[in-house]
């Protein structure tokens, strides 16, 4: 009798494989395809009632099915030696080949497989491919292969055709598959293959596999939503892993706001696996998620203090955005007071007391971060309107409806490169986050093109007198000046520059135009959108005449060209809407559109905001990026009489 060998690369496969001989017992593992080769050999003789003696092949199949491999090999050898038909011989050869596979004798297995013909030959390629992969793992070739090769091996392994009911070799295949899944970080495949191997294993071994798969399912970051959905469809409801898969699927459904799907999964768990303790907690989460007023939208704006007028205009824009929906929506306005603590309280009040489904705003940079942090902590979608802080993060349901800083600076520097008299750039900025971001973006763009950055002093947020700064800028002699601040601050700095006889390069901008004579000096002024608000520039508009602005919204040039939004806004404010007003309108319109389409809880609205591609907006809009920033095309415009006029033919 041959003794089975054990190989370090495989778990013991004889008398246990990794799953035990008991796993191959019973009708479920009967080798029906081979039994056809000796059909009737065990049937009773109808004439005598005496069952015939089992043939050697019958004995080989029964022994193999019971995991007695030495006995199976001996009986199969006897079957080959006995007179019989070719199909019986091929079945016996296949038994010997499979015994060799189970015992890790690769060369013998391939030799036996090469001898198999007839109806059994259709299974040879699957076993032969498995032997190749097992032997390459045994000699280290597979482990040394590149990731692409190992992934290809995993795909080949997945598609092998083996004899139906060959539990012994199927367990070996699945073990190799799981080892590859683990090595390649293919966690969804690992869970699926563990679910497949569990019925083939003895209890102790099954627990080890189940614990490994459960660790993957318990890790919130291990699987994507699509992978969890795939597992829900592929793992049998009778599997010990199914409750864990169902739990993860219900959790992802709640996180996506699909409360109907989540409740349906929990109902199914209650019906098939009563007593699962985690179901109650998820039902409570469903109730909490549903506890929102889908008709109530919060708006964070300054309604008191010096910025109250800005807040009034923003609220007017939001009202116009929601007007087409009649009384479907209620606006819950809260004053930020320009204060972080007040803003946090306002967010909490909108979420807890008003049960608002979403929040639009704030507009002030100094409270934007506080609002974003509070909204993220409370799980409420927030569409910020501030033009200076990049608070967006779609994963945290934080969005910002303003052109991105990078897009604005790229457009402005590109324009300056072809229209300024030189390529020496200075950035005027305060000592804050926005100024740092703009300065960094300008430096990267200018450096990439081979230009020069000039250092000039920054200033404090409380500073109101800028003559010393203007003198330093004049001495530096820049060709281009970028204003990295709000329009209100530009309205203070530009007159100081003019006092020192430093003016914007006049339009039309021609890089080949002569410099002015005498003491007057000129530079091409560049205004990011935050610095180009006509209302905030006010009486300082003559000091930025000819400046180039980056704009995401351009008002219509004539009354006939105005959109419905502009017409409605003009009726309230004859000065017309600013970019901020337009973006406030758009943020509210986007949220209302998605809610009206069925995103009636906060997670669902978060999901919808992250995937929306267009909406009926005043400014061009093509969705939000993964960073939560709106994808707005940026145009360059020349400031004329305090208002940006788009440059024809320019981006």
Image (cartoon, helix red, strand yellow):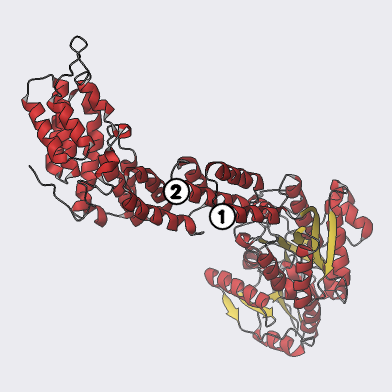
Judging depth in this view, the residue of 242 and 169 nearest the camera is 242
Question: Is residue 457 visible in this depiction of the protein?
Answer: yes
**Which residue is the site of mark 1?**
278
- Ranked by sequence position, the earlier of labels 1 and 2 is 2
Question: Residue at image x 39%, y 50%?
Answer: 190
* Percent of width and height locating residue 413: 63, 67
Is 292 situated left or right of 622 in this image?
A: right
The N terminus sits in image quarter:
top left
* Percent of width and height locating residue 639: 79, 66
Density class for disc 1 (Cα within 10 Å; few <14, some 14-19, many ≥20) is few
Q: Residue furthest top?
A: 47
**Which residue is the site of mark 2?**
241
Foreground label between 1 and 2: 1
Question: Residue at image x 31%, y 31%?
Answer: 27
* Percent of width and height locating residue 17: 24, 47
* Percent of width and height locating residue 290: 71, 52
Above or below for 278 versus 95: below
Q: Residue furthest left?
A: 81
Question: Residue at image x 56%, y 71%?
Answer: 444
Judging depth in this view, the residue of 526 and 598 nearest the camera is 598
Q: Secondary structure at mark 2?
A: loop
Density class for disc 2 (Cα within 10 Å; few <14, some 14-19, many ≥20) is many
Question: Residue at image x 63%, y 74%?
Answer: 437
Is 571 situated left or right of 362 in this image?
A: right
Q: Are marks 1 and 2 in contact (CB under 8 Å)?
A: no
């Amino acid at each position: 009798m041959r003794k089975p060998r054990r190989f370090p690369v495989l778990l013991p496969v004889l008398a246990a494989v990794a799953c035990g001989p008991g796993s191959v017992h019973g009708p479920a593992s009967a080798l029906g395809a081979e039994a056809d080769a000796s059909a009737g050999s065990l049937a009773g003789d109808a004439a005598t009632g005496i069952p015939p003696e089992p043939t050697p092949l019958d004995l080989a199949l029964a022994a193999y099915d019971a995991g007695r491999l030495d006995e199976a090999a001996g009986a199969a050898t006897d079957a080959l030696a006995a007179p019989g038909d070719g199909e019986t011989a091929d079945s016996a050869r296949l038994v010997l080949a499979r015994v060799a596979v189970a015992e890790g004798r690769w060369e013998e297995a391939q030799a036996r497989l090469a001898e198999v013909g007839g109806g059994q030959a259709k299974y040879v390629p699957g076993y032969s491919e498995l032997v190749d992969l097992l032997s390459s793992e045994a000699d280290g070739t597979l482990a040394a292969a590149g990731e692409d090769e190992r992934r290809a091996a995993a795909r080949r392994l997945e598609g092998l055709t083996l004899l139906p009911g060959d539990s012994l070799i199927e367990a070996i295949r699945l073990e190799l598959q799981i080892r590859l899944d683990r090595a390649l970080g293919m966690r969804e495949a690992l869970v699926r293959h563990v679910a497949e191997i569990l019925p083939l294993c003895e209890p102790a071994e099954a627990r080890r596999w189940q614990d490994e798969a459960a660790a993957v399912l318990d890790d919130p970051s291990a699987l994507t939503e699509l992978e969890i959905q795939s597992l829900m469809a592929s793992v049998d409801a009778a599997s010990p892993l199914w409750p864990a898969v169902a739990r993860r699927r219900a959790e992802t459904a709640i996180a996506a706001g699909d409360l109907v799907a989540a409740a349906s999964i929990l109902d199914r768990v209650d019906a098939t696996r009563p007593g699962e303790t985690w179901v109650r907690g998820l039902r409570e989460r469903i109730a909490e998620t549903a506890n929102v007023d889908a008709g109530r939208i919060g708006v964070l704006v300054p309604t008191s203090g010096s910025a109250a007028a800005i807040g009034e205009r923003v609220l007017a824009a939001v009202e116009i955005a929601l007007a087409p929906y009649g009384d479907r929506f209620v606006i819950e306005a809260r004053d930020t007071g320009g204060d972080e603590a007040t803003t946090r309280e306002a967010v909490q009040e909108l979420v807890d007391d008003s049960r608002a489904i979403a929040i639009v705003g704030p507009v002030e940079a100094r409270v934007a971060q506080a609002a974003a942090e509070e909204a993220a902590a409370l799980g409420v979608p927030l569409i910020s309107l501030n033009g200076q802080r990049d608070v967006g993060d779609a994963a945290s349901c934080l969005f910002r409806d303003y052109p991105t800083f990078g897009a604005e600076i790229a457009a402005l520097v590109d324009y300056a490169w072809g229209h300024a008299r030189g390529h020496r750039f200075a950035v005027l900025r305060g000592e804050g986050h926005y100024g740092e971001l703009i300065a960094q973006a300008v430096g990267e763009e200018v450096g990439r093109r081979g230009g020069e950055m000039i250092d000039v002093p920054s200033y404090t947020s409380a500073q109101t007198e800028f003559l010393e700064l203007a003198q330093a800028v004049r001495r530096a002699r820049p060709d281009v000046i970028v204003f990295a601040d709000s329009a209100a601050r530009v309205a203070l700095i530009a007159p100081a520059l003019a006092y020192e006889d430093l003016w914007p390069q006049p339009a039309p901008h021609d890089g080949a135009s002569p410099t002015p004579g005498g003491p007057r000096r000129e530079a091409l002024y560049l205004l990011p959108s935050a610095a180009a608000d006509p209302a905030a520039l006010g009486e300082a508009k003559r000091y930025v005449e000819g400046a180039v602005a980056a704009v995401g919204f351009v008002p219509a040039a004539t009354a006939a060209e105005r959109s419905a939004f502009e017409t409605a806004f003009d009726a309230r404010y004859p000065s017309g809407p600013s970019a901020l007003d337009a973006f406030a309108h758009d943020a509210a319109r986007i949220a209302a559109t998605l809610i009206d389409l069925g995103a009636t809880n906060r997670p669902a609205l978060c999901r919808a905001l992250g995937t929306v591609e267009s909406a009926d907006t005043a400014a061009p809009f093509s969705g939000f990026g993964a960073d939560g920033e709106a994808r707005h095309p940026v145009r360059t415009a020349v400031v004329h009489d305090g208002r940006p006029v788009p440059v024809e033919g320019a981006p």
